[in-house]
Amino acid sequence: MSDTALRLVDVFERSDRIVGRRLADEYILVPLVNRGADVDSIFNLNRVGALIWERLDGRTSGEAVVEAIIERFEVDAKRAASDYAEFIEKLVAIEAVRRVERDH
């Protein structure tokens, strides 16, 4: 990821390089060709991934997203936080999201 580890207080926003679309019962992320993303990569999200993606609005903290995972999927907090962190790291690696710098 970066020099600093992922913290649940961090806020992420979707980049303009990739768009998410729900198609029937599936949710996919599609790179935009004119933004320089890898056109050969289309990402099919599971239900947890789709929930996370939809909440990466540049205002919602990781804590709030984890709470939503717990409520929707009835998993424990440790599992929800682990799933969130793992997915965010993947999204950062493909430049689909970026951390929002907040004033302290």
Image: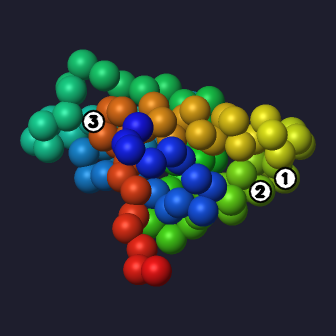
Q: What residue type is labelled 1?
A: Glu
Q: Which of marks 2 and 3 is in front?
A: 2
Residue tagged by mark 2? 67
Q: Where is residue 36 in the image (x, y as percent from the top left)?
A: 12, 37
Give how far apart the Cα atoms at labels 2 and 3 are. 28 Å
**Which residue is farthest bottom?**
104
Residue tagged by mark 3? 31
Look at 81% across and 40% down and name the residue there.
78
Q: Position of residue 85 (x, y in %)?
A: 59, 40
User: Are the residues at dot 2 and dot 1 in contact (C-beta closer than 8 Å)?
Assistant: yes
Residue tagged by mark 1? 71
Q: What residue type is labelled 2?
A: Glu
Q: Is mark 1 on a helix, strand or loop?
A: helix
Crowd class of label 3 (few under 14; some 14 to 19; many from 20; radius 10 Å): many
**Which residue is farthest front?**
3
Look at 53% across and 47% down and name the residue there.
6
Look at 88% across and 41% down and name the residue there.
76
User: Which of the image's four quarters has the N terminus?
Assistant: top left
Q: Is residue 29 above or below residue 5?
A: above
Give how far apart the Cα atoms at labels 3 and 1 are. 30 Å
Q: Which of marks 3 and 1 is in front?
A: 1
Query: Which badge, 2 or 3, comes first in the chain's sequence?
Result: 3
